[in-house]
C-alpha cells in the first residue's frame, strides 16, 4: 500500500529496528511494550531514554499509541499494516505442521468432508477460527443413487464428473419401495449424465411429463423429490462456506464488547453476508493476503484480521479460498506460511482427484 510504503521509507535503520522489535514483542505477549523492556534486548544496545525518543517519533507518525498514560506502546492498525508489509519476517512451518496439513487433506472422503477436515486442522494449528470457501459446484453430473435409511428417511448420492460426491438426506414419498428407487435412479441416470444440476432439473422436469406413462407413480414422485432437492440446495446461494474454531475467537474476547462484536461476525458469516467478497479478496493477490481490522468490511466490526489464500485447480484457475480469522494480534509470521501451505495442499488434492477421474 502506498501510504505504508512511504512511511517505511521515512524510517532510519534504528527506528525501523525498534519498531519491528516492539511490534513483535506485542504480538508475542499481547501487552503494551515499554522502553525499558526493549532496552534489555542486547542486540539493540540502546538506552531506555534513546528508545523512548524513537517511540515518541513513531507515535507521531501514527504507528504507535499508548492505551494508558505512562503505559507502554502498542501498534496502531497502520503500524500493523506497515509491519506486515515491510518488516515481518515470515518463518517456515515445522515438519510436524507440514505432516498435519498433508494428513488433513489426504482423507478418503468426499470433497466437502475433506475441506471440513482441512478447516478443522487449520483452526487447531492457528488457535483461531478458520474459513474454507468454495463456489457451489456447477460440475456435470455422472451418476445418482438413492439409498433408504429408514421408513421416513432416504439419501440421495450425487456423483459429479470432477469426482466429488454430494450426499443429501430427504423425506421419500410414502410407500416407496426398493424397486421404485432403482427405477427412479435408472430414469435419472439416463437423462442427467453430462448435465449440471440446474440443467438436469430442467431436463428431467420435461422428461417426466413426456414419459409419465412409462414411469411408475412412486418412481415419478421420487424423481420429482430429487428435483426439489436440487432446487433447495441451489436456493442457499452460490457458495459453500465451512467455518471451524468459533470458540477460539470467543475465548480470546477481552470484554463483553469484544464478545458482542465476535458474535456479530459469526452472525454475518451464518447469513453469508458479503460472502462473495471472500473469494474476491483472495483473488487480489497471487498468494496469501492479510487484511487487518477495518481494511475488510466483513470483519471490521469484530476488530479481526483475515489471512487468506486462494487454491487453484490444474488449470491454475482459482476455485476457492482458505483462511484464518483472528484478533489483530496474530502471529502473522507463523500463520501466513501455514495458510499458504494448506492452500497449496488443497489445490494439489483437487488436482489429484480430478486426475483420477479423467
Image: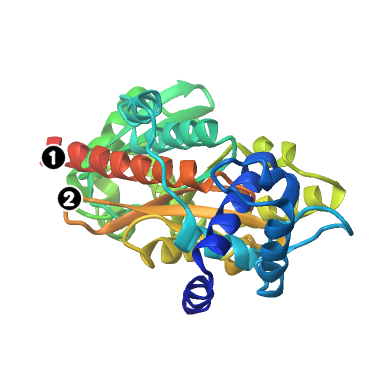
Q: Nearer the viewer, residue 168 or 246?
A: 246
Q: Quadrant of residue 74?
A: bottom right
Q: Nearer the viewer, mark 2 or mark 1?
A: 2
Judged from the image, the secondary structure of the residue bearing numbered disc 2 is loop
The location of residue 286, given as percent across then percent down, is 31, 61
Judged from the image, the secondary structure of the residue bearing numbered disc 1 is helix
* First reached walking from the N terminus: tag 2 or tag 1: 2
Q: How is the image coloured?
A: rainbow
293 up-or-down from 212: above or below: below
Please give the name of the residue rendered at 36% of the width and 64% of the height, measured from the top-left corner: 285
Residue beneath disc 2: 314
Instruction: Give the residue furthest to the left.
Output: 358
The label on residue 355 is 1
Please give the name of the residue rendered at 23% of the width and 40% of the height, measured from the top-left corner: 348
> From this viewpoint, is residue 33 visible?
no
Q: Quadrant of residue 305?
A: bottom right
Q: Nearer the viewer, residue 113 or 128?
A: 128
Please give the name of the residue rendered at 71% of the width and 44% of the height, measured from the top-left corner: 37
Quarter of the image containing the C terminus? top left
Answer left or right for 355 relative to 242: left
281 up-or-down from 184: above or below: below
Q: Nearer the viewer, residue 289 or 5?
A: 5
Q: Are marks 2 and 1 in contact (CB under 8 Å)?
A: yes
231 up-or-down from 37: above or below: below
Crowdedness of circle 2 by 10 Å Cα count: few (<14), some, many (20+)? few
Answer left or right for 92 relative to 122: left
The location of residue 38, given as percent across then percent down, is 67, 47
The location of residue 45, given as percent across then percent down, is 59, 47
Give how far apart the Cα atoms at labels 2 and 1 are: 9 Å
Q: Nearer the viewer, residue 30 or 50?
A: 50
Amino acid at each position: 500500500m502506498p501510504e505504508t510504503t512511504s512511511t517505511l521509507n521515512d524510517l532510519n535503520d534504528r527506528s525501523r529496528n525498534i519498531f519491528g522489535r516492539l511490534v513483535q514483542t506485542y504480538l508475542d505477549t499481547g501487552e503494551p511494550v515499554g522502553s525499558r523492556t526493549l532496552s534489555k534486548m542486547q542486540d539493540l544496545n540502546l538506552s531506555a531514554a534513546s528508545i523512548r525518543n524513537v517511540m515518541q517519533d513513531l507515535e507521531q507518525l501514527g504507528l504507535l499509541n499508548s492505551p494508558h498514560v505512562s503505559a507502554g506502546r502498542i501498534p496502531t492498525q497502520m503500524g500493523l499494516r506497515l509491519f506486515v508489509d515491510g518488516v515481518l519476517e515470515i518463518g517456515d512451518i515445522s515438519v510436524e505442521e507440514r505432516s498435519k496439513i498433508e494428513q488433513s487433506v489426504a482423507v478418503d472422503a468426499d470433497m466437502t468432508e475433506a475441506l471440513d477436515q482441512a478447516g478443522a486442522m487449520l483452526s487447531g494449528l492457528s488457535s483461531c477460527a478458520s474459513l474454507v470457501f468454495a463456489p457451489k459446484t456447477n460440475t456435470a453430473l455422472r451418476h445418482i443413487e438413492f439409498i433408504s435409511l429408514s421408513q421416513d428417511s432416504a439419501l440421495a448420492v450425487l456423483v459429479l464428473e470432477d469426482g466429488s460426491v454430494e450426499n443429501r438426506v430427504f423425506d421419500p414419498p410414502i410407500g416407496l419401495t426398493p424397486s421404485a428407487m432403482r427405477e427412479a435412479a435408472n430414469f435419472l441416470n439416463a437423462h442427467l449424465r453430462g448435465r449440471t444440476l440446474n440443467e438436469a432439473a430442467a431436463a428431467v422436469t420435461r422428461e417426466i411429463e413426456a414419459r409419465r406413462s412409462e414411469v411408475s407413480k412412486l418412481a415419478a414422485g421420487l424423481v420429482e423429490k430429487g428435483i426439489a432437492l436440487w432446487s433447495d440446495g441451489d436456493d442457499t446461494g452460490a457458495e459453500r462456506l465451512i467455518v471451524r474454531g468459533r470458540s477460539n475467537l470467543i475465548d480470546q474476547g477481552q470484554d463483553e464488547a469484544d464478545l458482542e462484536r465476535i458474535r456479530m461476525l459469526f452472525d454475518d458469516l451464518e447469513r453469508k453476508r458479503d460472502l462473495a467478497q471472500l473469494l474476491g479478496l483472495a483473488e487480489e493477490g497471487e498468494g496469501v493476503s492479510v487484511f487487518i481490522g477495518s481494511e475488510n468490511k466483513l470483519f471490521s466490526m469484530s476488530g479481526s484480521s483475515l489471512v487468506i489464500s486462494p487454491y487453484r485447480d490444474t488449470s491454475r484457475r482459482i476455485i476457492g479460498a482458505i483462511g484464518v480469522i483472528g484478533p489483530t494480534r496474530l502471529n502473522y509470521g507463523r500463520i501466513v506460511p501455514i495458510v499458504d501451505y494448506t492452500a497449496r495442499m488443497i489445490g494439489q488434492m483437487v488436482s489429484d482427484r480430478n486426475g483420477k477421474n479423467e
